[in-house]
Image (cartoon, helix red, strand yellow):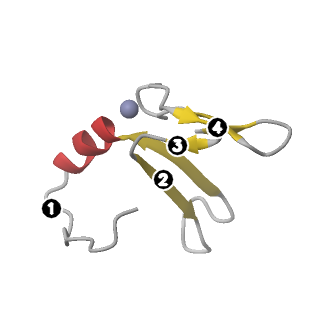
Amino acid sequence: MKVYNDCRELTHVICNRCEKQLNVQNGLLKDAVFEGEQSFGYFSKRDGIKHSFDLCEDCYEEWIRMFRIPVTETENTELL
Ligand SMILES: [Zn+2]
């Protein structure tokens, strides 16, 4: 979950799963985060609803370990 101040500057990022507060300095996130976002459409049970959440790196790793089919992993040549 991202929290912004009145000037729309990022102040906090909290993992939705474990509530770990990630490192934000001067409006910039200094930790890895998984940003999940899904808008559900007509054929969904959640038609018209949008979900968004953030996961810390540990929770992301734990989550993807539950997948029966592993995530597709490729090398990113441009580092962020
Ligand atoms: Zn977490």
Amino acid on which the number 4 mark rests in the picture = Asn
Towards the viewer: 28 or 2: 28
Dots 1, 3 in contact, CB < 8 A = no
2 vs 80, nearest the viewer: 80
* Residue to which mark 1 is pinned: 70
Q: Is residue 2 left or right of residue 63?
A: right
Q: Which mark is residue 35?
A: 2
Sequence-first disc among 2 and 4: 4
Residue located beneath label 4 in the image = 26
- Residue type at mark 2 is Glu
Q: Residue at x 78, y 36 (%)?
A: 5
Count of labels in the image: 4
Front disc: 2 or 4 = 4
Say whether marks 2 and 4 touch (CB < 8 Å): no
Q: Quadrant of residue 45?
A: bottom right
- Which image quarter: residue 42? bottom right
Q: Nearer the viewer, residue 8 or 78?
A: 78
Q: Is residue 70 left or right of residue 64?
A: left
- Circle 1 residues within 10 Å: few <14, some 14–19, many ≥20: few
Residue 39, percent across and down? 60, 65
Q: Secondary structure at mark 2?
A: strand
The amino acid type, in three-letter code, at marker 1 is Pro
What type is the residue that disc 3 sits on? Leu
Nearer to us: label 1 or label 4: 4
